[in-house]
Image (cartoon, rainbow, N blue to C red):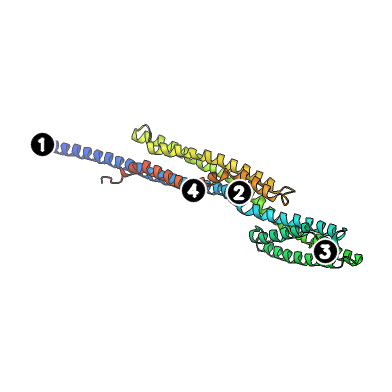
Amino acid sequence: MSGARRAARAGLRSRAATKEARASERAGTERGREGGTRAYLVRRLTALLVLAAAAVTALFAAYYGVSRNTTAVSERSTPAILQVAAAHDALEAADAKAEDSLKGHTTDVEGLGEDYRNELSTANQSLAQAVKSTTGGKAARQSLLTIAGLVSSYSDIIEQAYVNRGNHALRNAYLSYARTMLARDHDGILARLSTVQEGQRQVLRAQTSFGWLLAFAWWLLVPALFGTLAVLLWHTQRSLRRRFRRLVNPWLAAATALLVAVLPLASFTYETQERLGTAGRVLNGDDIGSNGGETADKVADTLRDTRWRAGAVGWIPLGGAVLAALILVGLQPRIDEYRFQPR
């Protein structure tokens, strides 16, 4: 009997040990499953935040790359180009007026004439403003200062032609020298002005063109990043629905909806770029020097509605912060559920 009791007790202890082992195995499996879920959520949160940061940064750079040019064109390139064009046209007009006055029949009475002096004054004033506003850099500024000195020498030669108006040969020699100084190829006053203007128009082309870097950002980088982020958010929603039996995570849904904001920003960029192109064509006109005020008004009217669109660039970092907060609030509580695991 005692042997049978001992055998029964041993059997009971064996069954209890087996149950305990199975329970321990189930607990270990559950802990492993919970640890795997937490690791998955941490990885997904990190991926979403990194991708959101990259997408918002790319969007900010792409949008700013276009919107900043509206101010550059209206406040810097427009006055710089118009001042040089005005000086160029005024000098051409002054030279024609000087010749008409010196070869006319009223030179002794009227002198060089009020028209000549007005055109020369306009040229000097335009040059003085161009030195301050040029977008061609230090070289263009130095060239304009040189041109201003040459214009002064040109006016002195014209005065000598007037002083010697009674000697037609000497008068004509002075006129020819003045015209050569003004219109000589490569190093004449007008040629120097044209060189400065070409440099400024190169800056304008850079400001109004949609270069390869912006094209890459808007046509490839921004769509790829935002599309990937949207897919990853959608996949995260599916995973959470499967793991936590919840139909939708409202925070992640709001983050997904916020991505749609890239569409109006893309539309703003397109409209801004179109207007920049129009302003560039206006500033490349042939008669802008003699119609500076009208040209400036056209440029201002063209770019007027772009100012508030350019201001939207400041909302992009704020939108990025909201996007990151929505992702964090959507996933962090799920991660916290697995923070303390039983041992």
Residue located at (74% from left, 58% from top): 118
Q: Is residue 284 left or right of residue 172?
A: left
Mark 1–mark 2 distance (CA, rounded to whole Å): 88 Å
Q: Which dot, 2 or 3, sits closer to the camera?
A: 3
Mark 1–mark 4 distance (CA, rounded to whole Å): 85 Å
Q: Which dot, 1 or 3, sits closer to the camera?
A: 3
Q: Nearer the viewer, residue 185 or 149?
A: 149
| Secondary structure type for disc 3 | helix
Residue located at (72% from left, 60% from top): 121
Q: Give the mark, 4 or 2, whose residue is nearer the N terminus.
A: 2
**Depicted 187 relative to depicted 278: above or below:** below
Q: Which residue was labeled with disc 2?
A: 213
Q: Residues within 10 Å of mark 3 (few under 14, many from 20)?
A: many
Q: Which dot, 4 or 3, sits closer to the camera?
A: 3
Residue 247, quarter of picture: top left
- Identify which amino acid the numbered label 3 is placed on: Ala
Q: Give the mark, 4 or 3, whose residue is nearer the N terminus.
A: 3
Q: Which residue was labeled with disc 3?
A: 178
- Identify which amino acid the numbered label 2 is placed on: Leu
Mark 2–mark 3 distance (CA, rounded to whole Å): 47 Å
Q: Is residue 100 left or right of residue 11?
A: right
Q: Nearer the viewer, residue 153 or 145?
A: 153
Q: Give the mark, 1 or 3, whose residue is nearer the N terminus.
A: 1
**Depicted 50 relative to depicted 120: above or below:** above
Q: Which residue was labeled with disc 1?
A: 5
